[in-house]
Image (spheres, grey):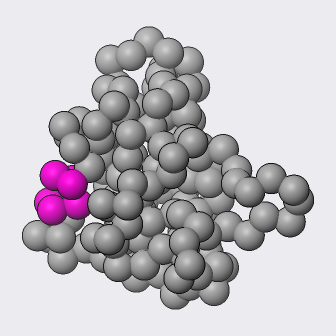
Amino acid sequence: MEIHIVLDNIRSAFNVGSIFRSADGAGSVIKIYLCGMTTDIDNPKLDKTALGATEMIPSEHYDSTMEAIEELREKGIPIYSIELTDDAIDFQKVKYPEKIAIVLGHEKRGVSDEILHKVDKSIYIPMRGRKESLNVANCASIILYEITRE
Protein backbone atom coordinates (compact mmCIF):
# COMPACT_ATOMS: atom_id res chain seq x y z
CA MET A 1 0.00 0.00 0.00
CA GLU A 2 1.27 3.46 -0.95
CA ILE A 3 -0.73 6.54 0.07
CA HIS A 4 -0.09 10.15 -0.88
CA ILE A 5 -2.04 12.94 0.84
CA VAL A 6 -2.68 16.22 -0.97
CA LEU A 7 -3.82 19.12 1.21
CA ASP A 8 -5.61 21.66 -0.99
CA ASN A 9 -5.40 24.99 0.85
CA ILE A 10 -6.02 23.78 4.41
CA ARG A 11 -6.06 26.97 6.48
CA SER A 12 -5.61 25.57 10.02
CA ALA A 13 -2.12 24.54 11.10
CA PHE A 14 -3.78 22.44 13.82
CA ASN A 15 -5.69 20.44 11.18
CA VAL A 16 -2.50 19.93 9.19
CA GLY A 17 -0.68 18.71 12.31
CA SER A 18 -3.49 16.32 13.12
CA ILE A 19 -3.38 14.93 9.58
CA PHE A 20 0.36 14.27 9.95
CA ARG A 21 -0.29 12.38 13.18
CA SER A 22 -3.09 10.30 11.65
CA ALA A 23 -0.91 9.60 8.61
CA ASP A 24 1.78 8.18 10.85
CA GLY A 25 -0.77 6.20 12.85
CA ALA A 26 -2.41 4.62 9.82
CA GLY A 27 0.92 3.80 8.16
CA SER A 28 1.59 3.49 4.42
CA VAL A 29 1.67 7.28 3.83
CA ILE A 30 4.58 8.03 1.51
CA LYS A 31 4.26 11.83 1.35
CA ILE A 32 2.06 14.76 2.31
CA TYR A 33 1.74 17.50 -0.31
CA LEU A 34 1.20 20.87 1.39
CA CYS A 35 -0.43 23.03 -1.27
CA GLY A 36 -1.24 26.72 -1.63
CA MET A 37 -2.08 28.38 1.69
CA THR A 38 -1.50 25.13 3.59
CA THR A 39 1.18 25.81 6.20
CA ASP A 40 4.64 24.34 5.91
CA ILE A 41 6.01 22.15 8.71
CA ASP A 42 8.01 24.97 10.30
CA ASN A 43 4.84 26.47 11.83
CA PRO A 44 4.96 25.95 15.64
CA LYS A 45 1.14 25.57 15.79
CA LEU A 46 1.39 22.53 13.53
CA ASP A 47 3.63 20.64 15.93
CA LYS A 48 1.16 21.08 18.80
CA THR A 49 -1.06 18.49 17.13
CA ALA A 50 1.54 16.63 15.02
CA LEU A 51 3.64 15.83 18.14
CA GLY A 52 6.70 14.99 16.05
CA ALA A 53 4.93 13.19 13.19
CA THR A 54 6.33 15.76 10.73
CA GLU A 55 9.68 14.04 11.25
CA MET A 56 8.19 10.66 10.33
CA ILE A 57 6.19 11.54 7.21
CA PRO A 58 7.96 13.22 4.27
CA SER A 59 6.30 16.39 3.02
CA GLU A 60 6.81 19.13 0.47
CA HIS A 61 5.18 22.51 -0.06
CA TYR A 62 3.75 23.37 -3.49
CA ASP A 63 2.66 26.84 -4.60
CA SER A 64 -0.48 25.31 -6.10
CA THR A 65 -2.40 22.07 -5.72
CA MET A 66 -2.29 21.62 -9.50
CA GLU A 67 1.51 21.23 -9.32
CA ALA A 68 1.09 18.30 -6.90
CA ILE A 69 -1.67 16.76 -9.04
CA GLU A 70 0.52 16.95 -12.14
CA GLU A 71 3.41 15.28 -10.30
CA LEU A 72 1.13 12.45 -9.16
CA ARG A 73 -0.30 12.06 -12.69
CA GLU A 74 3.24 11.72 -14.10
CA LYS A 75 3.80 8.88 -11.62
CA GLY A 76 0.55 7.18 -12.69
CA ILE A 77 -0.98 7.33 -9.22
CA PRO A 78 -4.83 7.35 -9.09
CA ILE A 79 -6.17 10.50 -7.41
CA TYR A 80 -9.33 10.50 -5.26
CA SER A 81 -10.88 13.60 -3.72
CA ILE A 82 -12.69 13.42 -0.41
CA GLU A 83 -15.61 15.62 -1.36
CA LEU A 84 -19.37 15.48 -1.59
CA THR A 85 -20.07 15.76 -5.31
CA ASP A 86 -22.95 14.52 -7.48
CA ASP A 87 -20.90 11.50 -8.56
CA ALA A 88 -19.13 10.80 -5.24
CA ILE A 89 -19.07 7.21 -3.96
CA ASP A 90 -19.52 6.13 -0.34
CA PHE A 91 -15.99 5.61 1.05
CA GLN A 92 -16.91 2.14 2.36
CA LYS A 93 -18.00 0.93 -1.09
CA VAL A 94 -14.73 1.71 -2.85
CA LYS A 95 -12.07 -0.84 -3.80
CA TYR A 96 -8.91 1.16 -3.14
CA PRO A 97 -5.91 0.69 -5.41
CA GLU A 98 -2.47 -0.28 -4.03
CA LYS A 99 -1.18 3.19 -4.88
CA ILE A 100 -3.49 6.13 -4.23
CA ALA A 101 -3.46 9.87 -3.66
CA ILE A 102 -6.24 11.44 -1.62
CA VAL A 103 -7.07 15.13 -1.85
CA LEU A 104 -8.52 16.93 1.17
CA GLY A 105 -9.81 20.48 0.76
CA HIS A 106 -10.22 23.79 2.50
CA GLU A 107 -12.26 23.65 5.71
CA LYS A 108 -15.17 25.73 4.34
CA ARG A 109 -14.83 25.61 0.55
CA GLY A 110 -13.70 22.00 0.19
CA VAL A 111 -11.61 20.76 -2.74
CA SER A 112 -11.47 23.41 -5.47
CA ASP A 113 -13.50 22.86 -8.66
CA GLU A 114 -10.30 23.06 -10.71
CA ILE A 115 -8.89 20.08 -8.81
CA LEU A 116 -12.18 18.16 -8.75
CA HIS A 117 -12.08 18.14 -12.57
CA LYS A 118 -8.65 16.47 -12.45
CA VAL A 119 -9.32 13.62 -10.00
CA ASP A 120 -10.20 10.05 -10.94
CA LYS A 121 -12.94 9.66 -8.34
CA SER A 122 -14.63 11.54 -5.56
CA ILE A 123 -15.56 9.73 -2.38
CA TYR A 124 -17.54 10.86 0.62
CA ILE A 125 -18.24 9.93 4.22
CA PRO A 126 -22.02 9.68 4.82
CA MET A 127 -23.36 12.01 7.46
CA ARG A 128 -26.07 10.58 9.71
CA GLY A 129 -26.68 13.71 11.78
CA ARG A 130 -27.69 17.21 10.77
CA LYS A 131 -24.30 18.61 9.79
CA GLU A 132 -23.19 18.29 6.18
CA SER A 133 -19.56 17.44 6.86
CA LEU A 134 -16.86 16.50 9.36
CA ASN A 135 -13.69 18.34 10.28
CA VAL A 136 -11.05 17.80 7.56
CA ALA A 137 -8.60 16.16 9.97
CA ASN A 138 -11.31 13.73 11.13
CA CYS A 139 -12.10 12.92 7.49
CA ALA A 140 -8.44 12.20 6.85
CA SER A 141 -8.28 9.78 9.78
CA ILE A 142 -11.39 7.90 8.74
CA ILE A 143 -10.31 7.58 5.11
CA LEU A 144 -6.72 6.58 5.94
CA TYR A 145 -7.86 3.81 8.24
CA GLU A 146 -10.42 2.59 5.69
CA ILE A 147 -7.81 2.46 2.93
CA THR A 148 -5.35 0.56 5.12
CA ARG A 149 -8.03 -1.76 6.58
CA GLU A 150 -7.98 -4.01 3.53
- In which quadrant of the rendered view does residue 63 lie? top left
Query: Is 87 in front, or is 40?
Result: 87
- Measuring 65% from the left and 59% from the top, which residue is drawn there? 142
Query: Is 89 in front, or is 145?
Result: 89
Q: Is residue 132 above or below residue 49?
A: below
**Helix, strand or loop for the magenta stretch, by majority:** helix
Query: Is 146 in front, or is 116?
Result: 116
Q: Is residue 49 left or right of residue 9?
A: right
Q: Is residue 1 above or below residue 145?
A: below
State the residue lying farthest toward the top.
44
Q: Is residue 119 left or right of residue 94?
A: left
How many labels sit on residues? Answer: 0
Q: Is residue 129 visible?
A: yes
- Measuring 29% from the left and 41% from the top, which residue is drawn there? 35
Q: Is residue 73 left or right of residue 21?
A: left
Quarter of the rendering occupied by the N terminus:
bottom left
State the residue lying farthest toward the right.
129
Q: Which span of residues is magenta-colored?
A: 66-71
- In which quadrant of the rendered view does residue 38 lie? top left
Q: Is residue 2 magenta?
A: no
